[in-house]
Image (cartoon, rainbow, N blue to C red):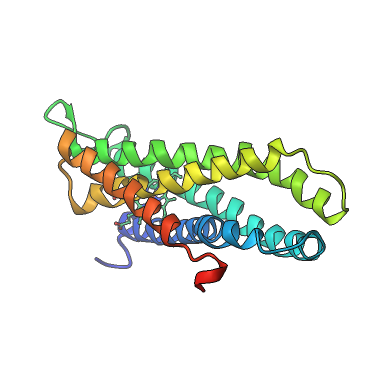
Amino acid sequence: MALTDLFSNVHLLLRWFHVLAGIVWLGHLYFFNFVNVPFQGTMGADVKKSVNPQLLGRAFWWFRWGAMATFVIGLLLFTQLYMYQPGVGFGPSELFRANGAMTGRAVWILFGMTLGTIMWFNVWFIIWPAQRQILPAVRDGQPVDPALPKKALKTSRLNAYLSGPMLFGMLAPSHYGGINVVTAVVAIALGLFAIWWAIRISPSVGKL
Ligand code: HEM
């Protein structure tokens, strides 16, 4: 690999930035689900009023922009790898289609991208719109419509669960390849189990 190999260098940079942004996004998602949810129950209204808008306002900034960067760079990566052929132009590459059929690699990444896109949608169109109403209301001591935190929590939990199988969909294309019903079911089951287990072992106050 040489520095003059533009395709490979762009590829590595996109991959690196995609994973970096994904860590920022999922790191905050896990902070919300594994740390913040059990922590919120320990605070009184006064402490919430001074802590939440300051702390969570910052956390939600990184969370939503991490999600946006991961998504946009993921789409660029997909275009470069699967919808572009160097020297030929745009269109399905050999990674996408071989011998007249979609490759296992493409099925894996489409599986991962579908889950990732649902998660990105949830961040930008459900969780953040709810939080941008909740946080100022808490800061100003105004009543919060109880449906809003419920909706935000449910969607955030859903995203946490989806992230387990989604990561298999990100890693399997270039590190595994083949896909069939058994491998897909195992990936989904392991992914869901890992998140269920993490939520289950998240320490409550008494166990710290
Ligand atoms: C939001 C929608 C997402 C899209 C459209 C997307 C797209 C992609 C694409 C096209 C690839 C390259 C697959 C290949 O090697 O054939 C990839 C790889 C990867 N993605 Fe995503 N992704 C998304 C979300 C995420 C998230 C949330 C993470 C969390 C960290 C993530 C982490 C990764 C990792 C670790 C790789 C593999 C890197 C490697 O093995 O070199 N992706 N993604």
| Rendering quarter of residue 51 | bottom right
Establish if 93 lies above or below 28.
above
Kindly tell me whether residue 64 is visible in this rendering. yes
Q: Residue 207's x, y, as percent?
A: 50, 71
Residue name at image x 26 percent, y 40 percent: 108
Is residue 151 toward the left or the right of residue 3 in the image?
Answer: right
Give the residue at the far left of this rendering: 99
Residue name at image x 28 percent, y 33 percent: 92
Is residue 47 toward the left or the right of residue 168 in the image?
Answer: right
Residue name at image x 29 percent, y 42 percent: 188
Residue name at image x 24 percent, y 47 percent: 173
Q: Residue 142's x, y, as percent?
A: 87, 47
Q: Residue 7's x, y, as percent?
A: 32, 54
* Foreground of the two, 161 or 90: 161
Establish if 102 lies above or below 7.
above
Kindly tell me whether residue 18 is visible in this rendering. no
Is residue 52 toward the left or the right of residue 117 in the image?
Answer: right
| Rendering quarter of residue 88 | top left
* Foreground of the two, 26 or 198: 198
Q: Residue 65's x, y, as percent?
A: 60, 53
